[in-house]
Image (cartoon, grey):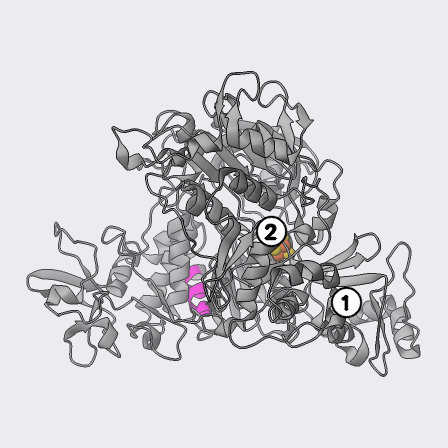
């Protein structure tokens, strides 16, 4: 891939600089003359502090405080910097937390005090721009969303039939009483409450493997970071239901700050790593980094990808897997992998990761353990290691020995032992990628073979400072594609290496058995057992509404799932979901009464953005209510939120793990869990007291960050020696490990997964197809469905929907920008406004917008009933690469 490194010719650069100078002349004049003291323009708020540009003396604005907290706009877990008007609690501005490694480049050193931060963010010594941290548009819009006049602020109970859109305001106490005790709640007959459902009796005595009746209480949640720990304690450990389907943050992230080469495959940068945009831009601007977007659509943030140090390789939707396999094949054939890394078969001191590339797999057809790793016990070793380690071929002498004792193992092994064929994981991968020639994989993607070969060559030309970022989700083979793309990272040994792919941070235990409090276990804790309502998350509701494998009695929808953002699901389920006989009780915890929440019997309002508690596990980012939630309060004065609902229900039910003696410290003393702060501040103590020590927050830190509001709660909840350290962490918005040291134990990364059938334990080509293997094009030939439809999430939700299509396709169809167009899939139709782009592959249309729920979806024609098309490996509904056609409306 060629980059236009010389794009900025001297003349163009000169003109640009001249324009910059003209545009900033007034600022420059003020900087020189010292006139840049606060003089807010228009309706801009006064600055949070004045810093003497010569001495660096900081004079904070006493009418404001600046708090650091967690952005819950998506699962990334970025840090917010929130400026608040002290007298009113009004949010004036939000930006990125300058201590936070995801949004600041470089971040402030951990030891920086809030007052020093104000100085470093000023023009004193010109460090202000260096440490200024940025959010994506979605994060920046959170306060506006929180102030939305349509937000639900009071507990609601439906009036009339479900989904009629009529509600009455009730108290939290009434809501909890009715949800727990049940009864004739809507004049439609008796409804079983949570108390009746929390029953150890089997759901079906004839099928005891389904588990207890408690499993008929289910919880379906979103990827909102930092709040899952308390939910898990309630649903699984306290109530005893297995049916908690909620995810937290993604497991790994690219070290853009040190990478030399980045590929984003599937989705554009804007969708894949919004927090990294500044580092990406900085890397490109300095020429330190090149990046390529390999995707059907060039995202909003990637519009400059055709410029210097960047490129766009358009590929067909659902072909990311083929791209990865083609690249892997090139890399193995040409020996461009990191042999030193791959040959290391076990965790070694001083390393961040190792792979199972050399681990041997039983490949004897028909063998009962075909596809499993060969174990030491298979060779008759008495396993000193109770884990029964995998076996490798020692590179030194060809003997078969436990991986744990071999320093270097052979990479490519295909041999027999005791009549058994065994092969190394890497050998299986080589075979899988050689199943088709490079040209075939390239043709699947819709790119020249030379482009794929060049991509593989460029990717392997930077040592470990290159990274492949899987940006895909929602394709029919998306799980395998992600596996294959991550395998590219493994091949160059970049997992946990500077400039590579960094595993999630586990340096500090928050909601765990930590150094101060045990938040993982408690007396009376239940171990949930039985069968999850459906093995396929996206079909969870569909299955239970059909009584498979058993009907649900009560469901909590947390956030916006499952109808929103899942094309076709609403159409498939709306009728059943609106029928209380199919699912007697639905409680939504949400900020708005739309989407899935419109089907609820009760809505619990929730805190939002800067109002919320939370500990983002991956980044150790602290969420704390830097402003008071707008929601109503309960009888005891607590804001109505997810937490007050959970704690109130737990109290009414008498659940273990909650109440006045629920949390144990290291000495075994018991402490209460009756308020949100009891949980989150003690999790904070676990983080603050993990070695090495963190500084105490002084009174000045508390005042500058608004933590003085929280001081009574800090002192009442934590021990005298604890609270100032926890406040010190909160003042900085978290505790941020150096990304390179955030992993305490070397991770094993897998070239081959044992639980997949051999040779499918390694990535292999599987075209987008339905459940019975029928290829997409069989029932939906391109002659009738000439486009492939993808969705493109806007970083800032826009009003209405847009339909992006290539200008050549539009010309052929006689469409222009601004035309209202009809988009059809085999099972759905919707209208939108056409927007013509060059940055979209021909033959592809993209729906842009945040709410695609009523949009076209696709049933799986090879399955019966309301079955949606899902990725068979993950169960995720297929949202990308649907057959479609477009026409003027
Ligand atoms: S990517 Fe944007 S919305 Fe997501 S956490 Fe970061 S700033 Fe918030």
**Of discs 2 and 1, which sits in the foreground?**
2
The residue tagged with tag 2: helix, strand or loop?
helix
Residue 497 occupies quadrant: bottom left
Q: Residue at label 1?
A: 704
- Above or below, 4 against 812 in this view is below
**Which of the numbered marks, if any, corresponds to residue 641?**
none
Residue 84 occupies quadrant: bottom right
Q: Residue at label 2?
A: 676
Residue 870 covered by magenta stretch: no
- Above or below, 43 against 528 in this view is below
Q: Earlier in the sequence, mark 2 or mark 1?
A: 2
Residue bounds of the magenta highlight: 452-459
Q: Position of residue 764 (x, y in %)?
A: 31, 52
Magenta residues, dominant SS class:
helix
Q: Position of residue 198 (x, y in %)?
A: 42, 35
Quadrant holding the C terminus: top right
The residue tagged with tag 1: helix, strand or loop?
helix
């Amino acid at each position: 891939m060629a980059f236009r490194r010389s794009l900025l010719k001297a003349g163009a650069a000169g003109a640009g600089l001249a324009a910059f100078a003209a545009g900033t002349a007034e600022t420059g004049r003020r900087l020189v003359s010292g006139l840049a003291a606060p003089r807010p323009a228009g309706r801009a708020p006064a600055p949070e502090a004045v810093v003497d540009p010569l001495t660096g003396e900081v004079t904070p604005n006493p009418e404001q405080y600046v708090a650091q907290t967690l952005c819950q706009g998506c699962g990334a877990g970025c840090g917010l910097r929130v400026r608040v008007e002290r007298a009113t609690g009004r949010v004036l501005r939000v930006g990125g937390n300058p201590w936070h490694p995801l949004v600041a480049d470089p971040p402030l050193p951990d030891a920086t005090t809030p007052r020093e931060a104000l100085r470093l963010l000023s023009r004193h010594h010109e460090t202000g721009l260096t440490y200024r941290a940025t959010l994506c548009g979605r994060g920046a819009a959170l306060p506006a969303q929180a102030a939305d006049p349509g937000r639900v602020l009071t507990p609601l109970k439906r009036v009339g039939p479900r989904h009629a859109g009529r509600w009455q305001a009730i108290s939290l106490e009434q809501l909890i009483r009715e949800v727990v005790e049940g009864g004739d709640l809507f004049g439609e007959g008796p409804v079983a409450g949570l108390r009746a459902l929390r029953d150890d009796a089997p759901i079906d005595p004839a099928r005891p493997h389904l588990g207890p009746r408690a499993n008929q209480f289910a919880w379906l949640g979103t990827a909102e970071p930092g709040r899952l720990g308390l939910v898990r304690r309630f649903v699984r450990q306290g109530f005893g239901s297995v049916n908690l389907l909620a995810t937290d943050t993604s497991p790994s992230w690219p070290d853009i700050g040190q990478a030399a080469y980045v590929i984003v495959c599937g989705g554009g940068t804007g969708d894949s790593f919004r927090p990294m945009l500044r580092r990406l831009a900085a890397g490109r601007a300095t020429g330190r980094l090149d990046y390529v977007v390999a995707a059907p659509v060039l995202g909003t943030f990637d519009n400059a990808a055709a410029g210097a140090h960047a490129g766009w390789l358009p590929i067909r939707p659902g072909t990311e897997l083929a791209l990865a396999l083609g690249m892997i094949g090139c890399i193995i054939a040409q020996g461009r992998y990191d042999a030193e890394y791959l040959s290391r078969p076990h965790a070694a001191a001083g390393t961040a990761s190792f792979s199972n590339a050399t681990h041997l797999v039983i490949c004897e057809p028909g063998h009962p353990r075909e596809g499993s790793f060969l174990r030491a016990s298979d060779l008759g070793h008495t396993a000193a290691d109770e884990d029964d380690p995998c076996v490798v071929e020692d590179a030194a002498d060809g003997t078969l020995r436990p991986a744990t004792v071999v320093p270097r193992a052979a990479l490519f092994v295909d041999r027999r032992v005791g009549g058994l064929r065994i092969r190394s994981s890497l050998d299986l991968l080589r075979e899988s990628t050689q199943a088709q020639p490079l040209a075939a994989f390239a043709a699947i993607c819709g790119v020249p073979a030379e482009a794929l070969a060049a991509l593989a060559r460029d990717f392997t030309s930077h040592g470990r400072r290159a990274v492949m970022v899987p940006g895909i989700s929602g394709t029919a083979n998306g799980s395998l594609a992600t596996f294959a793309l991550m395998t590219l990272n493994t091949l160059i040994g970049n997992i946990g290496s500077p400039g590579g792919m960094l595993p999630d941070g586990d340096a500090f235990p928050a909601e765990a058995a930590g150094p101060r409090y045990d938040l993982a276990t408690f007396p009376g804790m239940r171990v949930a057992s039985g069968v999850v309502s459906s093995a396929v998350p996206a079909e969870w509701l569909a299955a239970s509404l059909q009584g498979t494998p058993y009907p649900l009695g009560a469901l909590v929808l947390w956030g916006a799932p499952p109808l929103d953002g899942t094309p076709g699901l609403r159409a498939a389920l709306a009728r059943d979901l609106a029928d209380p006989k199919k699912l007697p009780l639905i409680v939504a915890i949400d900020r708005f009464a739309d989407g899935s929440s419109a089907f609820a019997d009760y809505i619990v309002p929730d805190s939002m953005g800067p109002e919320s508690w939370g500990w983002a596990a991956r980044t150790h980012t602290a969420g704390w209510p830097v402003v008071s939630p707008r929601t109503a309060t309960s009888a005891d004065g607590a804001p109505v939120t997810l937490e007050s609902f959970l704690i109130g229900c737990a109290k009414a039910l008498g659940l273990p793990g909650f109440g006045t003696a629920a949390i144990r410290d290291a000495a075994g003393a018991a402490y209460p869990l009756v308020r949100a702060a009891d949980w989150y501040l003690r999790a904070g103590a676990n983080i603050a007291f993990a070695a090495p020590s963190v500084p105490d927050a002084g009174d000045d830190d508390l005042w500058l960050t608004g933590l003085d509001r929280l001081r009574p709660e800090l002192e009442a909840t934590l021990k005298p020696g604890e609270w100032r350290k926890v406040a010190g962490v909160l003042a900085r918005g978290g505790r941020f490990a150096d990304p390179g040291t955030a992993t305490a134990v070397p991770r094993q990364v897998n070239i081959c997964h044992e639980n997949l059938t051999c040779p499918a334990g390694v990535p292999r080509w599987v075209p987008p197809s339905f459940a019975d293997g029928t290829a997409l094009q069989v029932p939906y030939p391109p002659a009738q469905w000439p486009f492939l439809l993808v969705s493109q999430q806007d970083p800032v939700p826009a009003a209405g929907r847009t339909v992006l299509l290539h200008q050549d396709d539009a010309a052929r169809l006689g469409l222009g920008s601004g035309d209202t167009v009809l988009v059809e899939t085999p099972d759905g139709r919707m209208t939108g406004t056409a927007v013509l782009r060059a940055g979209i592959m021909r033959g592809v249309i993209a729906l842009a917008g945040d709410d695609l729920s009523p949009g076209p979806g696709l049933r799986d024609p090879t399955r019966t009933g309301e079955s949606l098309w899902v990725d068979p490996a993950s169960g995720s509904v297929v949202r990308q690469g649907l057959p479609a056609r477009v026409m003027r409306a």
